[in-house]
Amino acid sequence: MSQWLNDAVFYEIYPQSFYDSNGDGIGDIPGITAKLDYIRSLGCNALWLNPCFLSPFGDAGYDVADYCQVAPRYGTNEDLTALFEAAHTRGMHVLLDLVPGHTSVEHRWFKESCKAAQNPYSGRYIWSDNVWDDVARYEGIAGSLRGISERDGSVAVNFFSMQPALNYGFATVTAPWQCAVDSPQALATRQAMKDVMAFWLDRGCDGFRVDMAGSLVKNDPGQEQTIRLWQDMRAYLDEKYPHAVLVSEWGEADKSLRAGFHMDFLLHFGPSHYMDLFRCEHPYFSREGKGDIHAFVKAYRKNYELTNGKGLICPISGNHDMPRMRHWLDPEEMKIAFAFLLSMPGAPFIYYGDEIGMQYLDLPSKEGGYERTGARTPMQWDSGKNAGFSTAEADRLYLPQDPAADAPNAAAQQAQEGSLWREVQKLNGIRHATPALQAQGGIEFVYCQEDAYPLAYLRTAGSQRVLVVLNPAGRETKFLYDGKLGRALYTLNGAPTQAHGVVTVPPASAAFIEVE
Ligand code: NOJ
């Protein structure tokens, strides 16, 4: 695993909404480059960009029409290469979003595969051999398109219906038109995706966030063949691009790290109980103090034990697929949520705008966003026109911005002591200076009871031991701890005190304390 990951704090950018450098109302790549110093000053040293490739944008770019061309609305391939260089100059790294499971219906591969005459792309997607045999009724297929081509057959989709599934074969073949994982067609798709990765790695990208990484091989219930497929991808990268980093949207680290990914996300779906933290009726990090983190910790521990030493589990503040944390927590509560995110093992990911507590807005769907749209609004940079996002007229913006008179913005929070932005910056600084808090430091849960506060865990690296004590509840809480509390590396709203082994924790507080 690349050593830089141990101290990486990622910043996720939805390119549409980050910074518009040319006044057309939509964010772009030169805009990201222009804001690298901002990201660095927050203490983030790596980026993940959502897809920025040619696309009809039926799913915000997750419907790729050409993997090797930047969408004109974002700039050019040269702009992207310049971003990689500018990031590297600052000691930062950039991951692109690889969407290997499906393309847009506008991809040239798909158009070729729709032709009746055999051609090199006839096997690139999953087609039945007659239109009346609906692929959607077969195991492991999400849906289908029918009646859209001169070719006789129905074709599998992977997500929305305009996202046809690429053909990596079936783990168990049950119909004559299905390919095995080692068939020439399935292997050709695999090679094509290796070529896409090579294309961008040759231009300076540092790796990929991989979309729906567990979805590639069909009829593969335990995902063993999908795991093998990624092991092969990883072996290819290890040989040709050993520095390339892969993080999976999988949500089951025991599988994805075995598959060769360096990191897997804690996600809003899957067995993680991530939603219990910040996004449910009674989030654990709410001041009301009615949450329960017990199930999360139980699932986390299990995964951690299975994966420790093999790769990282990445905690996220949010992403472009879920309402923003601010929908449930106020900025003061979010400070403690960030104290958690930035003191856990793995590489944390901050979703753009969460560092200032941007709101989740109630908006009509845009580019296949549906209820996700409200978490994708333009970044609020300052108090100027369009909150500094763009010089375009407001009605030309990619999405409307938060109309509230007190909508947060980055410039104001950077200038204001005690703001959420300043707290995130402080926490990042402490993490960078404290090996025990970094990705590969160990974790032991010291206090985590059902329906109870606080949460306490020990982070360790070499001889350094740091006790993290988080009490989101608006009441004083206590727990038993035998060790002696030492120097506080960080406190918010007061430090815990200790008497006869009982630690008393102030309301709505967070602390990182050195212990022996
Ligand atoms: C997961 C992505 O994060 C989401 O935004 C997208 O719609 C689906 N995968 C389909 O690619």
Image (tube, rainbow, N blue to C red):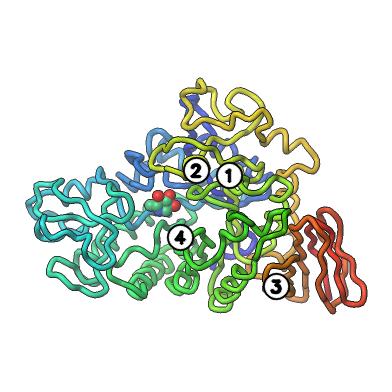
The location of residue 405, given as percent across then percent down, is 66, 28
- Label 3 lies in ligand 1 vicinity (Cβ under 8 Å): no
Q: Is residue 89 above or below residue 182?
A: above
Looking at the image, is mark 3 or mark 4 earlier in the sequence?
A: 4
Quickly name the residue at label 2.
Answer: 14
- The reply to whether callout 2 and callout 1 are in contact (CB within 8 Å) is yes
The location of residue 47, given as percent across then percent down, is 55, 50
Looking at the image, is mark 3 or mark 2 earlier in the sequence?
A: 2
Residue 200 seen:
no
Callout in the foreground (3, 4): 3
Distance between mark 1 and mark 4 Cα atoms: 18 Å
Quickly name the residue at label 4.
Answer: 249
Looking at the image, is mark 1 or mark 4 earlier in the sequence?
A: 4
User: Circle 1 sits in a helix, a strand or a loop, which is it?
Assistant: loop
Q: Quadrant of the C terminus?
A: bottom right
Residue type at the position of mark 4: Glu
Residue type at the position of mark 1: Tyr
Q: Residues within 10 Å of mark 2 (few under 14, many from 20)?
A: many
- Label 4 lies in ligand 1 vicinity (Cβ under 8 Å): yes
Residue type at the position of mark 2: Tyr
- The reply to whether callout 3 and callout 4 are in contact (CB within 8 Å) is no
